[in-house]
Image: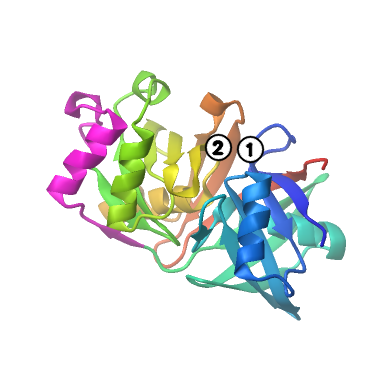
Amino acid sequence: MEILRYAAFTDRPDGGNPAGVVLDADHLTAAQMQAVAADLGYAESAFVSARGPGGATVRYFAPEAEIPFCGHATIATGVALAEREGPATLVLSTPVGPVELSTRRTADRLVASLVTVEPRVDAIDPAVRTQLLQHLRLPEEDLAGDLPVMLSFAGNVHPIVPVRDTATLTGLDYDYDGLKALMAAQGWGATVAVVHRVSRHVFEVRNPFPPGGVREDPATGSAAASLGAYLRARGEIAPPATLTVHQGAQVGRPSVITVHVPPSGGLTVSGEAVRISG
């Protein structure tokens, strides 16, 4: 078994979000995939099986649990395949449904793009919202006044928590155990997206990820897509629009995620990925 290592949403090996990629996982059990992901210790790893013309099956594992969908590991998978077989478009069968994955070459780089499943945006129960903010250690005065806390899905459910300024985002220091327990109780298996709007189409974000056994995710493609779905549902942007999401600086792995928001349907998440030496 060859375990590949890529950093996604970056152009350098020490940036972005590392992901393990196994391109021939047909012989692996779920327990073996989980063991590989735990050994790597990355936020998520992707395991590809049943590869055929135009398609494949993918499963995603964090160090402590299987995850329904992972954006950065999908981007890493696209680049890994393109480096070996050339740019192409294929449809991935994932636990959340079919996801289109395409790659293209730009100058001397490969860029991968995925199209999410149909998103949805929901209100959050007031009592759950109170607990969420308590565990994030965010008082009401630290929140953005014009953007509410809501739940958004574009492959995973992500609470979207807008804060008022960069200083609040930078100073985020949350209760790991408390947030992990709350997220388990609510069935939130991915990250919480704490976001700050820098300009109309540019955001800074941080993503605590206790369900996966990771304190903070350096780049979260599904959360970036969920943010785009949230903004579209609220009329905060005029589709078609393109968002730029900056993440990972606070954990020393800066990343850039591009999200294309069409008038309806799935959103397109794009980024580079580079090989990390084993």
Residue at image coords 23%, 33%: 134
User: Residue visible at 55% across and 46% down?
Assistant: 258
- Mark sitting on residue 218: 2
Quadrant in which residue 199 is drawn: top left
Viewer-nearest residue: 83 or 243: 83
Where disc 2 sits, the SS reads loop
Query: For this view, does 148 lie left or right of residue 109?
Result: left
x and y percentages locating residue 28 in the rendered image: 70, 70
Range of residues picked out in magenta: 120-148
Residue 111 against residue 23 in the figure, above or below: above
Q: Secondary structure at mark 1?
A: loop
Q: How is the image coloured?
A: rainbow
Task: Tell me: 223 left or right of 144.
Answer: right
Position of the C terminus, as image quadrant, is top right
Q: Considering only order in the chain, which callout, 2 or 1, is on the residue closer to the N terminus? A: 1
**Observer able to see residue 104:** yes
What residue appears at the point 25 percent right and 40 percent down from the top-left corner? 132
User: Count the marks: how many?
Assistant: 2
Above/below status of 273 relative to 176: below
Disc 1 marks which amino acid?
Answer: Gly
- Which residue of the protein is positioned furthest toward the bottom in this rendering? 53
Q: Nearer the viewer, residue 163 or 156?
A: 156
Residue at 45% from the left image edge and 60% from the top image edge: 262
Is residue 124 toward the left or the right of residue 211 in the image?
Answer: left
Marks 1 and 2 in Cβ contact (< 8 Å): yes
Give how far across and how far down residue 246 sits, in percent: 52, 34
Distance (Cα) linking label 1 and label 2: 6 Å
Q: Which residue is mark 1?
A: 16
* Circle 2: residue type: Pro
